[in-house]
Amino acid sequence: MIHEIDEALRRLLAPAVTGDVAFDAPTRDWAARRTAPTLNAYLYDIREDVERRERGAFAERDARGIVTRHRRPTRWFRLSYLVTAWTARPEDEHRLLSGALALLLPHEVLPEDAVPESVRPVSTTLPLSVAVPPAESRSLADIWSALGGELKPSLDVVVVTPFPVTPVYEAAPPVTVGAELVVRGIDGVPGDSRPRMLRRPAAPAVRGEDGAGRGR
């Protein structure tokens, strides 16, 4: 699923650059090997969108209406990309970022024709946000420090997508026999060890004013 979102993002960003759209970590070594104008979309964070989490399980039934399996609800994840431009001049990098922003801003969701086939059975509406401030627990300066590079202007692009594979549990077969009761004895008195079927006792008769018996 993640690699399919990569390809969807690549198709969205490709018209903004004459070179390549890369997904490598933008380290110093990678930057030194770059030979053409490049937009880099580095996937730096994957987190579950807990606000979309559902509890419980869904029952799957066969043609007779009997529950055969239980399926857990779909889980949604936020894929956060750090989009940067790499050229020989800062002015050209800013031009690339401007082009990327112009391509992404019109979309509040991933275009339907770019939605991966694997998630289409779950949803064709995948939220897309651009340049929204990251969560307080993340700092772009910390990310660049971890990459070992210098801070560059960037776009924070987030795609929210379902994970198409959910846990499935087989259901137990339906109950076809009644419960049995085995009496072992009380206070030392031997009991009947033969299993007996539990039955609901009949309701006592109620006599009306005319004396006739009526069952409840």
Image: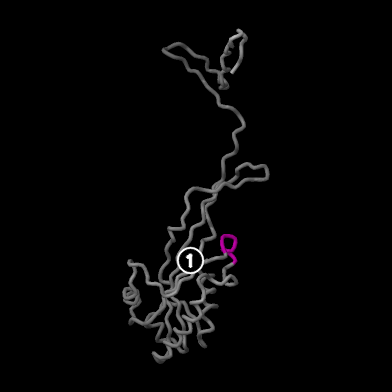
Element assignment for label 1: strand
Which residue is outermost to the front?
209
x and y percentages locating residue 165 in the rendered image: 54, 58
Q: Is residue 148 left or right of residue 61?
A: left
Residue drawn 38% across the image and 83% down it: 29
Q: Residue 24: which quarter of the image?
A: bottom left
x and y percentages locating residue 14 in the rendered image: 53, 82
Q: Residue 214: which quarter of the image?
A: top right
| Residue tagged 1 | 160
**Which of the pair 127/71 is nearer the observer?**
127
Q: Is residue 167 above or below residue 201?
A: below
Q: Main secondary structure of the magenta part?
A: loop
Q: Is residue 15 left or right of residue 40?
A: right
Q: Is residue 63 left or right of residue 193?
A: right
Q: Is residue 37 left or right of residue 178?
A: left
**Which of the pair 34/203 is nearer the observer?**
203
Chain part drawn in magenta: 117-123
Q: Is residue 210 above or below residue 66?
A: above
x and y percentages locating residue 167 in the rendered image: 52, 52
Label total for image: 1
Q: Residue 180: which quarter of the image?
A: top right
Quarter of the image where the C terminus is located: top right
Local packing at callout 1 (Cα closer than 10 Å; few below 14, some 14-19, many 20+) is many
